[in-house]
Image: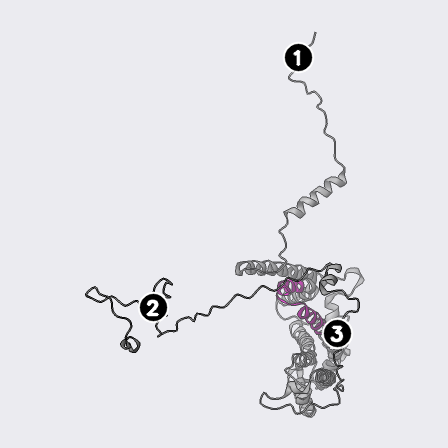
């Protein structure tokens, strides 16, 4: 006797076979790849798609800059991983000065900058943290800019862009590091003028503005040779246009260094002017070598005017003409085979005999303006038969008037 199962009981159901963890993960990755938007191989986009792509790239660029700003704000006063703090690194040129050239407001004569406003320290730390975050996150937001621009470039344009971006970053960093080591000598010269009667107390805002101005001006001035090289590669600037103007260029560079150098101290001015002149000379030598290579590969007649003749072509580069041998006559076959038998043995199709010519008619086709010929008479009609007269009689025969008519 069987009893019905209790509805309140929970009988054990057969368990489903569990999949391996690796298979489940592989299936999830496959579904994730299938859900992705298919890539556009040609890069063609509408205006709305361009704006959406620009919005997405800007969002990620601002996000990375914000994260870098938070890191820089924390790094300003802290020293992670045993590194010096950002504040100590930036005030290094000021603290390298002799103690009698800077004012001290502490009992232990510690090197510190002056703050004259309530929010000056906070705003200075925020500004320095933002600039540090811009530098720290530069690989990420520069990649966003590059990813937005690169679909519209050709392969050779991408290669040249890689090269120019690499040298631009390298030259800017070189100028920035040079300005960091020159800054202490420049400050010492400026603060030592009239130190017998006064002591300089620099505020944090004034010092960091001077510091950032030095970094930016030195970095941008080191980009001038790269601009010269780029103009020469594009064919806009040739070496013949600048080879005799070195003195003028040196004067212009020195004036540029004297005007743009913060403070106008001679040490920073001479250092920046000398370094830029040296880099410009290297750029000139590159232009000379590049123009020589370009002129070697480019023939002279391509530089002539459209109405100017290129002159006779010399025979130095031409080869002497060789005589042409006369054709030999075809010898008849000695085997005695006919041409049809030879073609049959070689498996070639037989030549068809020419079609017979159609007989030409002796009758001439009437020309325009001519009377058609009279139809031939029946053979049973006699040539001497006369014509019927209007009265019903027959005429005696052809008369002389018929020939005339």
Q: Is residue 379 above or below residue 251?
A: above
Q: Is residue 36 above or below residue 193?
A: above
Q: Say whether residue 156 is magenta.
A: yes
Q: Say whether residue 30 is magenta.
A: no
Residue 4: mark = 1
**Residue tagged by mark 2?**
383
- Give whichever of discs 2 and 3 has the lower sequence position: 3
One can see residue 136 in this view: yes
Residue 78: quadrant of the picture = bottom right
Foreground residue among 221 and 348: 348
Q: Quadrant of the N terminus?
A: top right
- Residue 382 x %, y %: 34, 66
Residue 195: mark = none
Q: Is residue 49 left or right of residue 16?
A: left
First to last magenta residue range: 141-170
Foreground residue among 225 and 201: 225
> Whole-Å distance between the Cαs marked 3 and 1?
113 Å
- Residue 291 x %, y %: 71, 84
Q: Nearer the viewer, mark 2 or mark 1?
A: 2
**Residue tagged by mark 3?**
330
């Amino acid at each position: 006797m069987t009893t019905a199962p209790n509805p309140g009981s929970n009988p054990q159901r057969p368990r489903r076979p569990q999949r391996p963890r690796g298979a489940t993960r592989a299936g999830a990755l496959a579904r994730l790849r299938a859900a992705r938007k298919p890539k556009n191989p040609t890069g063609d986009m509408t205006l709305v798609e361009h704006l959406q792509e620009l919005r997405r790239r800007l969002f990620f660029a601002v996000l990375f800059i914000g994260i870098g700003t938070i890191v820089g704000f924390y790094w300003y006063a802290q020293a992670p991983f045993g590194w010096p703090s950002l504040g100590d690194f930036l005030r290094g040129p000021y603290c390298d000065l002799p103690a009698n050239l800077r004012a001290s407001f502490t009992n232990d004569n510690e090197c510190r900058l002056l703050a004259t406003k309530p929010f000056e320290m906070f705003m200075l730390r925020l500004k320095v943290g933002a600039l540090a975050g811009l530098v720290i996150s530069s690989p990420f937001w520069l990649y966003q800019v590059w990813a937005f621009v690169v679909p519209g470039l050709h392969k050779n344009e991408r290669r040249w862009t890689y090269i120019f971006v690499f040298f631009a970053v390298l030259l800017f960093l070189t100028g920035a590091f040079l300005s960091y080591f020159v800054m202490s000598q420049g400050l010492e010269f400026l603060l030592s003028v009239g130190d017998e009667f006064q002591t300089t107390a620099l505020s944090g805002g004034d010092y960091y503005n001077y510091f950032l101005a030095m970094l930016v001006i030195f970095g941008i001035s080191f980009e001038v040779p790269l601009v010269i090289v780029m103009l020469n590669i594009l064919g806009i600037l040739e070496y013949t246009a600048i080879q005799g103007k070195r003195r003028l260029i040196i004067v212009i560079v020195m004036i540029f260094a004297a005007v743009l150098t913060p403070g106008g101290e001679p040490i920073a001015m001479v250092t920046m002017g000398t370094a830029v002149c040296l880099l410009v000379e290297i750029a000139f030598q590159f232009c000379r070598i590049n123009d020589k290579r370009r002129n070697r590969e480019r023939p002279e007649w391509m530089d002539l005017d459209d109405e100017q003749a290129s002159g006779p072509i010399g025979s130095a580069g031409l080869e002497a003409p060789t005589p042409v041998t006369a054709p030999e006559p075809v010898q008849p076959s000695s085997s005695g085979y006919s041409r049809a038998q030879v073609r049959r043995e070689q498996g070639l199709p037989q030549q068809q005999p020419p079609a017979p010519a159609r007989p030409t008619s002796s009758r001439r086709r009437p020309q325009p303006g001519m009377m058609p010929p009279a139809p031939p008479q029946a053979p049973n009609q006699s040539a001497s038969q006369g014509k019927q007269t209007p009265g019903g009689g027959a005429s005696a025969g052809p008369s002389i008037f018929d020939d005339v008519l």
